Image (tube, coloured by chain):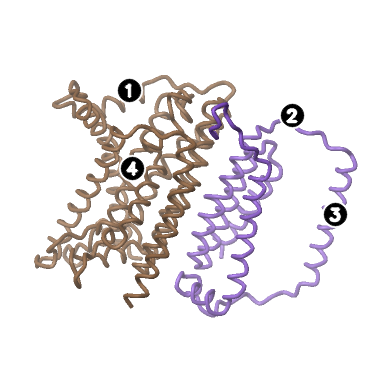
Chain colours: A brown, B purple
Amino acid sequence: MELTDIIVKVILIVIVFAISLVIAMYSTYAERKIAAFFQDRVGPNRAGPFGMLQPLADGAKMFLKEEIIPTRASGLLFIVGPSLAILTACIGSAVIPWGQKLTIGSTIIDLQVTDINVGILYIFGVVSLGVYGIMIGGWASNNKYSLLGAIRAASQNISYEISMGLSIIALLLVTGSLSLREIAEQQHGFWHDGWFTWNFFKQPLGFLIFIVCAFAETNRTPFDLPECETELVGGYHTEYSSMKLGFYLFAEYINMFVSSAVMATLYFGGYNFPFMELIDSPNLVTIIGVVVLFAKIFAFIFFFMWIRWTIPRFRYDQLMNLGWKTLIPLAIANIVITGIVITLLN
Amino acid sequence: MSTFYFIAFLSIFFAILVITARNPVHSILYLVLTFFTFTVHYILLNAQFLAIVNFIVYMGAILVLFLYTLMLMNLNKDNEPMKSNIVKIAAVFGGGCLLVTIVASLKTLAVSQPVVLQNPELGLVKNLGKVLFNEFLLPFEVSSLLLLSAMVGAVLLATKDKQPKTQPDGKLY
């Protein structure tokens, strides 16, 4: 690897990192504005024009709050919990292809941090690691409500990982590749050979299962049982204050961003858009592609929020029934149907 | 090579911490770290698929369940069950036997040539799948049968003693 390559990669990593943080920050603002819109309120409008500085004010508040570590808490693990939560949230974006190749002079910049050939499984591994942050934090707090929240998070994540994996298997039957870059390339344009190229139109049921599981894995309403305030005070973060609480809340928004990016890449064509072959300049295609990908991501983030302010929280037994008795059989049926269709078409 | 020795050192170090840690939850967390170093070993061997599967299945699922069980049991010094002396002596004896066996097997072990991979790409998904579903199809399917039987057994254990409770109005809940 040459020095320029390394510099380019480092710059790319920093940009991706900064973008995910900024988007997570403004997701909190968007969440409150959208909630206000749904409930016919105004929402935050004091800090700056339209309340645009509200996330900064919130961040400053979080940093300046008193730092409390409970006496009976397990000291180191109490700090490791939120750190792990935000770490696993941030590393997921490493394999997402943000756009095609960009050519500046003689250097070709690949708009993807790394293209490992097991990209989907990497995302899957990071997701499964995410639960440790919540479990460790909940256990280390030495509080029964926190512990219950942590245990709920663990069982919920494990249950929904299964159907998520099964829905991905059906997708793999269609794409034949585990690399996110290749999957994105296969969805080039919008229409090819008499059918849509985007995987959503080939795997509608798989996408439905995937998005339900994504809600459960990111602990978003209607599946935010680990922090169900009517039963568990604050769930796993009951004992947390200051920026450690901020990390937990922030990790949720970064997770939402990364899972939106994954869904856009896997099922909605990633950086591809209709009529992209009509544009001559490859750099222009790349730039429009990046913009299109982010538009898709924002649409998904809006969808996450839309669901949150529309659908009430599930009960715990309903959550388990949905996961084990509805989604898993549906996902298996989806695999079988996909297999049959692919065999018949060939 | 030095990377290998460093990671191998970490594996053994964390593995020792697993058995010396006083708190069972700490012990599981060290086990998580041990499995993470195994993942790094697989990556060093260019077995990407095995690495990521080890990551997902062992670190992401099995150890989460371990942690889950330990958190529910709430083990600490106060309610640690007292073990009788006979059990302790039996444990020491069993451990000694294992040690003797391992040392004996090490003694007979010939110094092996460093393994040269026939095909360095073997660990990638496509090649692994071809080997698994051509040469080793029968063992693969048989092992899946084993997992199925374990699952059926677990379901049977869970539903064995379940008495349906009825409310006065006859509804099940």
Does the CB distance between marks 3 and 1 fall below 8 Å? Answer: no
Name the chain letter of the residue that bears numbered label 1. Answer: A
Q: Please name the residue that numbered disc 2 is placed on.
A: B79
Quarter in which the N terminus of chain A is drawn: bottom left
As drawn, A56 above or below B19: above
Reading the image, the residue beneath label 3 is B96
* Whether residue A4 is situated above or below residue B136 in the rendered picture: above
Element marked by disc 4: helix
Q: How far apart are the two marked residues, 1 and 2, measured between alpha carbons?
A: 43 Å
Closer to the chain start, of discs 4 and 1, is: 1
**Chain ID for label 3?**
B
Which residue is identified by label 4?
A: A256
In the image, which disc is placed on residue B30? none
Residue A153: give x, y in percent of width and height: 49, 38
Q: Position of residue A192 (x, y in %)?
A: 19, 70
The residue at which mark 1 appears reads as A61
Classify residue A122 as left or right of residue A100. Answer: right
Residue A8 visible at all: no
- The amino acid at mark 1 is Lys
The residue type indicated by label 3 comes to Gly
Return the residue nearer the eye: A248 or A243. A248
Question: Whole-Å distance between the Cαs marked 2 and 4?
Answer: 42 Å
> What element does badge 1 sit on?
helix
Observer able to see residue B18: yes
What whole-number distance in Å separates the C-alpha atoms at marks 3 and 1? 59 Å
Q: Who's the residue at 35% across and 75% down the image?
A: A344
Distance from disc 4 to disc 1, alpha carbons, whole Å, reads 23 Å
